[in-house]
Image (cartoon, coloured by chain):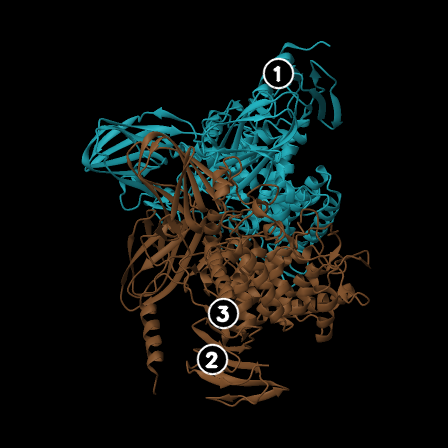
Chain colours: A cyan, B brown
Amino acid sequence: MKVSQSTLFLFLVLLVTNSSAQTWIWFPGDYENWLGNQMNNRRTERGVSIPVQWKLDGHEPLMIFTKTVELDEPEEIEVSAEGEYIVTIGWRIKYQGIKNSVTKVTVPAGKNEIKIKVINYATVPALFVKGKTINSDESWMTSPLDSRYLSKNMKHPDSPSGYYMNAGSGKLNDPNTPPSKFKLPTKPMEYVETKEMEGGTLFDFGKETFGFVKFHKLSGTGKLTLQYGETAEEALDAEHCETFDIIDIPSEKSDFTMPRSNALRYIFVAAENAEYDDVSLLYEYAPVEYRASFKCNDEELNKIWEVGRYTLQLTTREVFIDGIKRDRWAWSGDAYQSYLMNYYMFFDLETTKRTMYTLRGGDPVMVHLNNILDYSFYWFMGIYDYYLYTGDVAFLKQIYPKMESLMDFVLDRRNERGLVEGLDGDWVYIDWFDHEVDITGEVSFEQIVFCKSLETMAMCSEILGIDSESKKYTALAKDVRSKLSDFWDEEKQAFVFNRKDGVNSNQITKHANMFAIFYDYVSSEQKEEIKESVILNPEIPAISTPYMRFYELEAMCSLNEQEYVLSEIKDYWGGMLQLGATSFWEKYNPEHEGLEHYAMYGRPFGKSLCHAWGASPVYLLGKYFVGIKPTKPGYEEFEIRPVLGGLEWFESSIPTPNGDIKVYADKKNIKVKATEGVGTLIFKSSKQPEATIGDVEKIAENEYRIKIKGNAQEITIKYKAL
Amino acid sequence: MKVSQSTLFLFLVLLVTNSSAQTWIWFPGDYENWLGNQMNNRRTERGVSIPVQWKLDGHEPLMIFTKTVELDEPEEIEVSAEGEYIVTIGWRIKYQGIKNSVTKVTVPAGKNEIKIKVINYATVPALFVKGKTINSDESWMTSPLDSRYLSKNMKHPDSPSGYYMNAGSGKLNDPNTPPSKFKLPTKPMEYVETKEMEGGTLFDFGKETFGFVKFHKLSGTGKLTLQYGETAEEALDAEHCETFDIIDIPSEKSDFTMPRSNALRYIFVAAENAEYDDVSLLYEYAPVEYRASFKCNDEELNKIWEVGRYTLQLTTREVFIDGIKRDRWAWSGDAYQSYLMNYYMFFDLETTKRTMYTLRGGDPVMVHLNNILDYSFYWFMGIYDYYLYTGDVAFLKQIYPKMESLMDFVLDRRNERGLVEGLDGDWVYIDWFDHEVDITGEVSFEQIVFCKSLETMAMCSEILGIDSESKKYTALAKDVRSKLSDFWDEEKQAFVFNRKDGVNSNQITKHANMFAIFYDYVSSEQKEEIKESVILNPEIPAISTPYMRFYELEAMCSLNEQEYVLSEIKDYWGGMLQLGATSFWEKYNPEHEGLEHYAMYGRPFGKSLCHAWGASPVYLLGKYFVGIKPTKPGYEEFEIRPVLGGLEWFESSIPTPNGDIKVYADKKNIKVKATEGVGTLIFKSSKQPEATIGDVEKIAENEYRIKIKGNAQEITIKYKAL
């Protein structure tokens, strides 16, 4: 067998990785949920902590880790755990462990079950085992139940049990840093400008950022007041700045770092009986890799892509949050967009999984995710995409029991027609509307995302081989899908907003209509009709949040309207840049002036100026201009449909699970290189194209196709853009 | 209106109680479950911690306490909480609280909702509020959900929600001692004898006891080994004593108290490079009131009653446990007997409620209580009795959602005939059997306790006015009850043990048969038949545990066989006393000799010598000799059926919720005095009796009845015992 150097290298890397495979393990979801909520609950608002406004689920306080080993000779292992623990081998051998200390345990030769029980209420029971052959990893089983009393099939005969699962882990490989001590890394950052003001000093860090403020050589006996601002105006407004801190000076003259990290570009510091030499910041960040790149002839667009990346970087923390100043919370609808952008940027799966677990919490399900009906559905849809982009079946297996119980909750609350409605206690959100909307009854948008969620359940149960479930969900999805046509208004060529007592309302908004387009729930003809009668129709209320503009532009892209989308991007996101934005905002209204831009919720600085959903261009450019998407799970197969959309040229690299796809396109040349999977490049050309490798196939008038092998060979195509 | 002095006094007491009513509050069940499991998990076995072997459920980490108040003028309140907290009044006023510190909050005049969110993972979120009119008590509402997103009827339209409930509390009224710091009280205790031995000193505390060993003026740099023993032999046996501690000497010369309390009568202390002046014990005890009394002419029986009381006192801790050396755990079957004994001894309801909450844990239910099928049913039956003895509807309302979800779990696991069977993962226990028993299929005993559990659900749902549920459970109970006759073997005059594939087995044990008697599930004729064909039939396997002897003797009592029962008590429990028992044992076999008495589970000192289920005489004497039981909830009505059963005389006082019933009986006189409720005294006499107050009514040949008013007046009856 002849292997290439790079394959050999990869092989060696895998080998090394495997032989030092011990990592902290826990009950899947419990740690992720705990960690995500530690972050959620660090939100403050004008000096007061604001815990999440939805149900906070705890973890299993007693966890049983088991592993059956067969040894030729006795092996000494080192056990560490977060929590009080006891190690049992077989029935008789017992070791007592002390919290956070290492216990040496000798596992006898022969076949033995190692059982380690860990109790921890405050933080999540976690385990680290290091031996010659025995190491903690996801091959260990975890359960809150003792195996003697555990039915492995507690729920359905053919379904994975949510109470006996392979351990969860998250690349925490240092035995001395247990999971509860995990912190995002920091690095020092200096301000770029400072200004003495009445009563204090204003520091400008030059751009939107996030971190721990540090005072150098702080002394005195008084106190410090810190007013944080995303703008200078906010930092200087004691009455209205959204976040501030007041601290008593620690007695000794020394460096002092604030205990909590904050969003800021500016800080105004007022010192009372206090002195300090200098101020700096410990920039706190998620250590994601910048795996994607994008460059084109349009410098404004390049800047938009970069600021989009920075916005996504800042809002990527322990989990994906909405905005770094506010709410600093994981919201399912916002996170769904972060997942999608992440696939075209960092391809960071740990944060994605942590966010999904945090949002979902535990059982029993008593309320929708974040209390919002639609947000339960975005969670399912996020898993659909996760599987499509990653092909990670192990995660599906772990999360499936939680999918089941959430879907059971949803199904229990359907109306007689089998459709969902907002019930007492549900928040039916969809979007912030600037006009009055009657949101009761059967809302078409909710049925669409419900249908997609049922399709997700059907897909996952089929992949996991749970036949009865896959049949059930396929039938349910089909049923809901067939009822979508009830909402179609033939005259208006649109899905109406809602339906009550069997009668369609007159309300129409863009939401259901645009989702129907890119979910392919309507025919090509209907799509074109919707484009004219809804999306481009000025009589239909305009969408005013970047949140839903994400989908509006996605719908237009999927209708091949890249030129329109490009001009919208330059207009809207370019507009923010022209106002000096260094990250993208929660909302932007070009008609506002001055301080109006920063107000929201009736508060002068209520608006978040670094909001994940503001970064959508990075997704739209990657998916619909560079044109890359998986067509089989984990990019086993993929499609590249480069579209210039008005640009002269672009050059981009998009990450795949274990590789990249690089695309260059101008009006005459397309260059493509992929390092895994099998792709199909589809493009339009007014002349017969020529490829350096492979056969170009004509598939329609002026449209061509060529297979791309993921072998890292660059293919160049000469063509002529239409 | 003329009121008696005692009524006036009671009125004043209530007034005073109400005006200083602030107490620590929490989500009902969460703290009880947490506290009970703190105790459960303090069990050790030969130096190693043994956590519970069932699922340990955590608490809600975020709790929202709300109270709507209407004030004429602003009121300042003092808020303390266990956990980080935030106080919100209306939408705008927010206060940040620091864990364990007092925050002063001004509630404005007018109508306002006070909302306090408390986060605590390590211990249970709890709240203490002190004001002029605003105080924390059970009128506050608790929910893990924000009221904005809370449907108050999440489960059934007519059922109390398990997620929006009146706060729980437990007489913890000191703002400076938050619930997690609650400790049972201790008092100093001296040993009665000491003996220098090779390698150390043996201390004898004179009787079975429990507490923290204290070393006076401990010094040195070495270590101490403590071997605990319920017998001297155990304390001296380094290899087999069930519990021991090895501690390094703290460096300073000072008094040192062991961190963990232990069961012991003896301690053997071996000191290595260590010196101490003396040893004593801090006896740790539940501060229960000794509300019952019993005295009779038989000194052995008096001693049995007293040792029974002491056994119950020792096993009454934060919750009712099985035994103080082992398992030191709350087991539902054992606790059920403690509840019953407690009603005839301490009438301590806090411990009863705490135990029920600890056993039940949280939701979702994944396994039976303690993993045991029958133990789920004892839990329901415990609530049946609780309501009968106390009339406490507020508790029923709080616990009902947990009853519902456990019963849903049970109902989901029935077979096609609607009966229960042990499924994969279930432990079908019933009793320790000395002979081989096939415990598969439909087991008659389990159907009987299942039926009683369904009757409990029917009763509670009716009391709470949940009509649909009460109808459902009444029908289910009726159905199971009608199927009990399937197990009846006409030829053998007995319920067979089990039934498989529609065929009754040949196995017969006493268990189902004796429960059918005192649950009145069979006719009077059948009861007599069962007595002869099963209970007194030497061919039916004898019962060997005091656990099931409890019910065997109860069945005999309910068949008016007090004389038989008295002789059994004197024989069996008297037998333990003759062997020097100072508390009653887990198991006793009169045929054993010497050290054989202490062995169990293959371990020389494995047997618990202080086991709650060993104390049953205190229940049997109170209920079937003194003859007192409530006939309407909370002793609103009650019955007294004094039976000498071979005694010359007895004198007893039995507690009722807010009073006592005192009974004296000899062969010629019965004296009765009750302080609440309305009673009926029923007794047998061979002559027409005479009463000092009231009319004696003849109800059968030689049987009479007289009404007793709970007015604290003593009634004396002259009669002639049969």
Q: Check contact, mark 2 vs mark 1: CB within 8 A.
A: no
Question: Percent from the top left, x then y, of residue B475?
Answer: 69, 69
Q: Same chain for marks 2 and 1?
A: no
Mark in front: 2 vs 3: 2
Q: Secondary structure under badge 1?
A: helix
Residue position for label 1: A10
Instruction: Check residue B672 in the rendering and tell me which mark sits there, or answer none.
Output: 2
Against B632, is A4 above or below? Answer: above
In the picture as drawn, the residue positioned furthest to the left comes out as A273
Question: Percent from the top left, x then y, of residue B3?
Answer: 34, 84
What type is the residue that disc 2 sits on? Val
Rounded to the nearest whole Å, what is the CA distance between mark 1 and mark 3? 72 Å
Q: Earlier in the sequence, mark 2 or mark 3?
A: 3
Rounded to the nearest whole Å, what is the CA distance between mark 2 and mark 3? 21 Å
Q: Same chain for marks 2 and 3?
A: yes
Question: Percent from the top left, x then y, of residue A316?
Answer: 47, 33
Q: Secondary structure under badge 3?
A: helix
Question: Percent from the top left, x then y, of residue B671?
Answer: 47, 80
Mark in front: 1 vs 3: 3
- Relative placement, left or right, of B76 versus B412 is left
The C terminus of chain A, quarter of image: top right
Q: Is residue B161 visible?
A: no
In which quarter of the view is residue A652 placed?
top right
Q: Check contact, mark 1 vs mark 3: CB within 8 A.
A: no
Q: Secondary structure under badge 2?
A: strand
What type is the residue that disc 1 sits on? Leu
Front residue of this view, candidates A354 and A313: A354
What type is the residue that disc 3 sits on? Thr
Q: Same chain for marks 1 and 3?
A: no
Residue position for label 3: B390
